[in-house]
Image (cartoon, grey):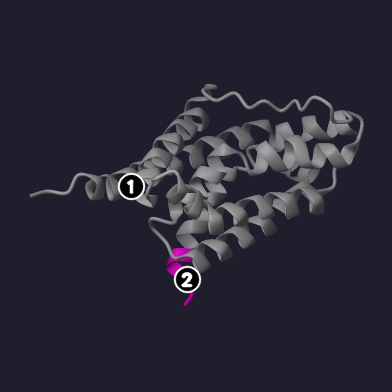
Amino acid sequence: MFDLEQIGKAFLILFAVIDVVGGIPLILQVRQQAGKLYPARATLVSMAIMITFLYIGETILQVVGIDVRSFAVAGSLVLFFLALEMTLGIKLFKEDTSTPGLPSDDPKVYSIVPLAFPVIAGAGTITTVLSLRAEFERPNILVAILLNMLVVVVVLLLTDRIERLLGRVGLIVLRKAFGIILLAIAVKLFTGNITYLFPGP
């Protein structure tokens, strides 16, 4: 039922997209605004978002008349531009992290918005989870999500220590390295699914 190769590949793809290590500066900024973060709360909410889209995302696509492979092609383009952001240090996507009406001084709120969504489980992550359905079996993706959530909660708990260990330059190098990996993954996802949309004679 479980395939270690699929789990490993799905884990690496999600790890590169979530980019929780590269997002440490942003996490620190959110914590500074909130005064305190709740790593377990942020992790559970992020996990719930990803698992929800893993299991009912395909149903949503079917309702609007889109198959998984078409979405995978679209998702590969999103991943491509995310990878360009990471590699070139440019900003192509603008996430709205402000939510009118929520108490800005409540750290529990900050642990959900913007930390859980969109910093951890943002549009790129959700797109990736749905796109992976065209490549891997659902149980293997689920295990990959759970493993990534373990990494996320550890990073959130040890953010200060990791930042001191890697330093600013180390975080930049790591982000660019995973950007290149993600770029290759996006190309593979695109070429692996585009042929199904335009079958030969």
Q: Is residue 153 above or below residue 70?
A: below
Give the image location of residue 9, x and y in percent.
45, 59
Image point 49% across, 33% down: which residue? 82
The quarter holding residue 126 reads top right
User: From this viewpoint, is residue 14 visible?
Assistant: yes
Residue 5 in magenta stretch: yes
**Mark 2 crowdedness (10 Å alpha carbons): few <14, some 14-19, many ≥20:** few
Where disc 1 sits, the SS reads helix
Name the quadrant containing residue 164.
Answer: top right
Reading the image, the residue beneath label 1 is 188
Residue type at mark 2 is Leu
Give the secondary structure at mark 2: helix
Q: Residue furthest left?
A: 201
120 displayed left or right of 4: right
Q: Which residues are magenta?
A: 1-7
Residue under label 2, please give it.
4
Q: Residue at position x 59%, y 44% from top?
A: 18
First of labels 2, 1 by sequence position: 2
Q: How far apart in space, not on screen, are marks 2 and 1 (Cα)? A: 20 Å
Q: Nearer the viewer, residue 173 or 16?
A: 16
Q: Nearer the viewer, residue 98 or 107?
A: 98
Image position of 155 (left or right of 54): right
Whether residue 13 is visible to the viewer of this picture, yes or no, is no
- Rendered image quadrant of residue 181: top left
Residue 61: percent from the left, percent from the top? 45, 48
Q: Are marks 2 and 1 in contact (CB under 8 Å)?
A: no
Camera-nearest residue between 68 and 80: 68
Q: Is residue 5 left or right of residue 102?
A: left
Q: Amino acid at mark 1?
A: Lys
